[in-house]
Image (cartoon, grey):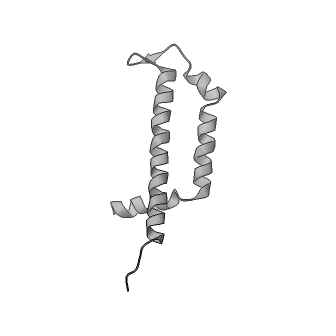
Amino acid sequence: MISRVRHRILHRLQLRESWMIFFIMGIIMLNFPFLHIFNKSDSVFGFPLLFLYFTVGWAVSIAVIYLFTLSVNQNNSGRHEKKEP
């Protein structure tokens, strides 16, 4: 069941629209309204909110890119399978 769910998620990530959605979300998250929300003098565990916002956003973007590369690699490996006679 887990492999089926993983396959569905990876298949959905192959869509060109999802690439564009994540790109646009990344641009929006780095613009004024969100930066203003997190640019406070408050801190969490001694770290400023803006620093945590950038760090967590960076980690999430790496995870999304990793999922996209997995889906592309899975798609390419399925196409280039050699059939022996």
Does residue 36 sit above or below 28 in this rendering? above
Q: What is the residue that sits farthest to the front in this orientation?
A: 85
Residue 40 in picture, x, y percent from top left:
54, 16
State left or right for residue 33 relative to residue 82.
right
Residue 54 in picture, x, y percent from top left:
51, 28
Residue at x 60% of width, y 28% of height: 34
The C terminus is located in which quarter? Answer: bottom left
The N terminus is located in which quarter? Answer: bottom left
State left or right for residue 5 relative to residue 64.
left
The one of 30 and 73 positioned closer to us in this rendering? 73
Instruction: Please tell me how many numbered marks the rendered image carries.
Output: 0
Residue at x 59% of width, y 34% of height: 29
Q: What is the residue that sits farthest to the right in this orientation?
A: 32
Does residue 43 sit above or below 1 in this rendering? above
Residue 12 in picture, x, y percent from top left:
51, 59
Residue at x 45% of width, y 36% of height: 59
The one of 81 and 41 positioned closer to us in this rendering? 81
Residue 83 in picture, x, y percent from top left:
40, 80
State left or right for residue 55 relative to residue 20.
left
Q: What is the residue that sits farthest to the bottom in this orientation?
A: 85
